[in-house]
Image: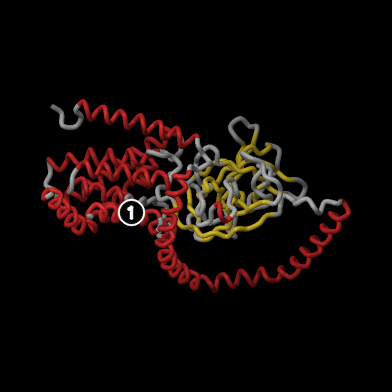
Amino acid sequence: MSPFFSNKKLIVLLASIIVLVALIGFSIKQQTKMTWAEEFVHDTVGWFQQIFNRPAQYVAGFFETIEDIENTYKENRALKANLDNYASVVQENQQVKQENHELKKELHLLNDPSLHDYTKHPALVIARSYDNWNQMITINKGAQDGIKSGMAVITPDGFVGKVTKVSQFTSNVMLVTDSSNDNQIASMIQDKKQNIYGMIEGYDPKKNVLSFNKVPVKSKIKKGQTVVTSGLGGVFPRGLVIGKVKDVKTDQYGLTKNVEVTPSAKINDLTNVIVVERHATTVKGG
Amino acid sequence: MKHVKLFLILFVLFLIQGTVMTVFSPEWFGYHLMIIPHFVFAAVMLVAFFLNQGTAVKYGAVFGFLIDIIYTNVWGVYAFCIAFTAYLLSYLTKIFHMNLFVVFIISMIGVCLLELEVYGIYSIVGLTNIPFVHFLEYRLPPTAVLNGVFTIIAFYPLRRFLERMREETIEE
């Protein structure tokens, strides 16, 4: 008699495989809405996670401070070099803003919120999916704080991801580095003459680049240009910085260009994030 | 009472592998290795070796499902893989005498098995596009070593706790 699989055990094994497949199918299909039981689990665990996370963050913050002190001199020199431009840029910015305001007034456009406008909800990262397959973080703001699924999440450096599931006091954020199929962002490169539109889809962990696809083949893209969200996906505001162009290639059929983009946010090291709610009306399923 | 304690121990490990370890991830220090903590699984293996098979499978399924709900988008993968791997490995208690060294080796093998199972399922579902060679090179060895080291640290306290628990259940 085999000790591993007698008849009864084999049946149990097969039954559990069937349950597994059913669960996988169920959970992949059901994407944004949470049942009350799921919300309960998320909120309870989230509470414990906050307790555990704070001390760890403090210790990590201490090491970061040491690193900061080491870099201060170098940073200071670079900043001083930039400072000369600062005053003139501020002046120019103010002028442009005023002009824009007046022009809008003349056109009676002031009451419509522009695609650029958004409200910020600051949040703390309380956990991160530890297996590298799921690129997901949990934050300590939920439906009670006005978070809705689909909202963009950023850091001061740039775009990080989008809210996928919301419970009452916590929510899950899928990072741009996640390789699941529905992780796409409508984005663009702002040029002086015209905008170049495309989609961010997919991430290459080896090179640390996002791929910016479906770009018209005739568009002229230079290295170092900034890629921002276009706001045409229906949920994100326009103009959130995603990253910088690293390399440009034509795709295998020669119809579109594939652009490699280095993300500007430090996605491996997230502690504080900002959830962004846009003022323009949002479209479902964006 | 002892079951409550065991549950709490596993729950704390579950929290540690999600919060504390990601703060100190190696990528944070600039290395490209992927080290994945599977502390709950390592503890479940010790339960399988020193308490009994049924309890290990039960706890493995429950905490695996918790991991699925909290940390992943797909349900049931960790629940199945942790319970199944712990079940298979528990038969090794009949062949080997479970001392520190043997448990260390078996836990490394077990973690590799678990990683392979999860990688297999995820790549079937289409959730990962990391090539297999890359997985073997950068992910499997450091992960196995980290969890092996964790097993060494947890071995004596957990074994004492589990053996006492076993005596109690036999007395009852």
- Residue lying at 46% horizontally and 42% vertically, measured from the top left: B73
- Residue lying at 29% horizontally and 44% vertically, measured from the top left: B60
Name the secondary structure under disc 1: helix
Q: Residues within 10 Å of mark 1 (few under 14, many from 20)?
A: some
Can you say which quadrant of the picture contains the C terminus of chain A?
Answer: top right
Q: Is residue A233 above or below residue A160?
A: above
Count of all numbered marks drawn on residues in the image: 1
Tell me: B149 left or right of B95: right
Is residue A209 visible to us here? no
Residue that mark 1 sits on = B11
The chain ID associated with circle 1 is B
Nearest to the observer: residue A220 or residue A276: A276
Is residue B3 visible to us here? yes
Q: Position of residue A47 (x, y in %)?
A: 43, 58
Nearest to the observer: residue A264 or residue B171: B171
- Residue lying at 54% horizontally and 59% vertically, measured from the top left: A123
What is the residue that sits farthest to the front in this orientation?
B172
Can you say which quadrant of the picture contains the N terminus of chain A?
Answer: top left
At label 1, which amino acid type do we have? Phe
Q: Is residue A254 above or below residue A60?
A: above
Q: Position of residue A149 (x, y in %)?
A: 57, 46
Nearest to the observer: residue A22 or residue A197: A22
User: Which color mode does the image show?
Assistant: secondary structure
Q: Position of residue B72 (x, y in %)?
A: 43, 44
* Figure quadrant of residue B121: top left
- Residue lying at 33% horizontally and 31% vertically, measured from the top left: A17
Tell me: B10 left or right of B163: right
Q: Position of residue A89 (x, y in %)?
A: 74, 65
